[in-house]
Image: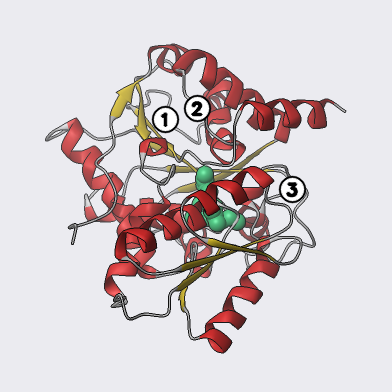
Amino acid sequence: MAKHFHLNTPLLESASMSKRVGTPVYLKMENAQPSGSFKIRGIGLLCQQVGLTSQSKGVVCSSGGNAGMAAAYVARKMGVPATIVVPSSSSQLVVQRLQDQGATVKIAGKVWDDANAEALRLQETEGLTYVPPFDHPLLWQGHASMIAEVAASLGPGAKPGAVLVSVGGGGLLCGVAQGLKDAGWTDVPIVAMETAGADSFNAAVKAGSLVTLDDITSEAKCLGAKTVCRRAFEYGQCGELTVISELVTDQQALSAVETFLDEERVLVEMACGAALAAVYSGLIRRLQDEGRLPALLGPLLVIVCGGSCIDMEQLTHLKHKLQA
Ligand code: PLV
């Protein structure tokens, strides 16, 4: 069996983003993973560690799309059936792509939280192995490998000035935080980005306690967990690491997707656009002006989390929807 399922992804320096921020910007190209996003790191590790065998009845994963893509890919490689439960807000495109990965797709409820309830039910009734999309220490450990790769790519002595990530349920944030701790980079601030309307982390940070949103109103459906995981909230609270929580609008996230496509020639989904928008909208500069990031900022590390829920048709559809 493969040692692991994810790839060591390229770390690219972006000339156009560097010009915008005024410091070198490095892109960790997680869009290049076999499943289209970083999710395969954690989910690959988790599936290996829970002792799945070809005798297993299969896995069940609740997802906005990309955790499901990773689970379907890993299960196929392990020779195990995969059932992916997505909410009705997930596009037909992602359902098709999951099926192309060999998964059985079930649509349950309106948002991820509903789909998750159904996945947990299937774990009970069908004896399937439940694969969580963001809330598990093994996922964070798996995601942390991306920071170890960055450390190896940058070489001894070099480290980022800040790390830019998107936050959905908070698994990526926890993985990056774990990776920073492992690398001894606890003084590197994390800028945690969400869209307004999928802002469960920002709401929790503001409230000082976990908050469950009434609904997900953002089009960045893969950021749409109504409650962020407790560990992510804790990273946002305690002084263990500096986590700066910021929001962009859907329009800014989508516009970032378009600029990234034009300038870097890579198509990512809005969940990823939320992080990219921190560069394109001038937010990083503003945080520097406000003294929340150093004026003399070291290299900015951007986690290009990727995502499969996008193609030209979907991009056009989102543009029309958000213009209306
Ligand atoms: N998406 C999860 C949760 O959705 C999923 O099921 O796929 N970037 C992309 C492209 C993503 O797909 C996700 C999560 C994130 C960022 C955020 O990662 P998280 O959930 O670990 O914070 C509801």
Q: Is residue 95 above or below residue 204?
A: above
Residue type pointed to by label 3? Gly
Crowdedness near tag 3: few (<14), some (14–19) or many (≥20) residues, C-alpha within 10 Å: many
Q: Nearer the viewer, residue 239 or 6?
A: 6
What residue is at 43 percent from the left and 60 percent from the top? 71
Rendering coords of residue 273 (x, y %): 57, 33
Kindly identify which residue carries mark 2: 288
Marked residue nearer the N-terminal end (1 or 2): 2
Above or below, comparing residue 200 to residue 36 in the picture: below
Q: Is residue 5 above or below residue 302?
A: below
Mark sitting earlier along the chain (2/3)? 3
Given this view, does label 1 or label 3 mark the residue nearer the observer?
3
Q: Is residue 124 left or right of residue 137?
A: right
Which image quarter: residue 41? bottom left
Give the amino acid type for the residue marked by disc 1 in the picture: Pro
Residue 38, position as x, y percentages in the image: 40, 47
- Badge 1 or badge 3: first in the primary sequence: 3
Q: Alpha carbon of mark 1 to alpha carbon of mark 3: how far?
A: 29 Å
Q: Which residue was labeled with disc 3?
A: 197
Relative to 73, is 275 above or below?
A: above
Q: Residue furthest right?
A: 324
Looking at the picture, how far across and down is residue 194, in whole percent? 61, 44
Q: Secondary structure at mark 1?
A: loop
Report the residue marked by disc 1: 294
- The answer to whether any part of residue 281 appears in the image is no
Can you give x and y, in whole percent of width and height, for residue 321 in the image? 81, 32
User: Could you tell me if the residues under marks 1 and 3 are in contact, i.e. CB atoms within 8 Å?
Assistant: no
- Establish whether ligand 1 lies closer than 8 Å to the Cβ of label 1: no
* Residue in the image at 33% along x and 66% along y: 79
Labelled pair 1, 2 in contact (Cβ < 8 Å): yes
Can residue 174 be seen in this snapshot?
A: yes
Q: Name the residue nearer the viewer: 76 or 185.
A: 76
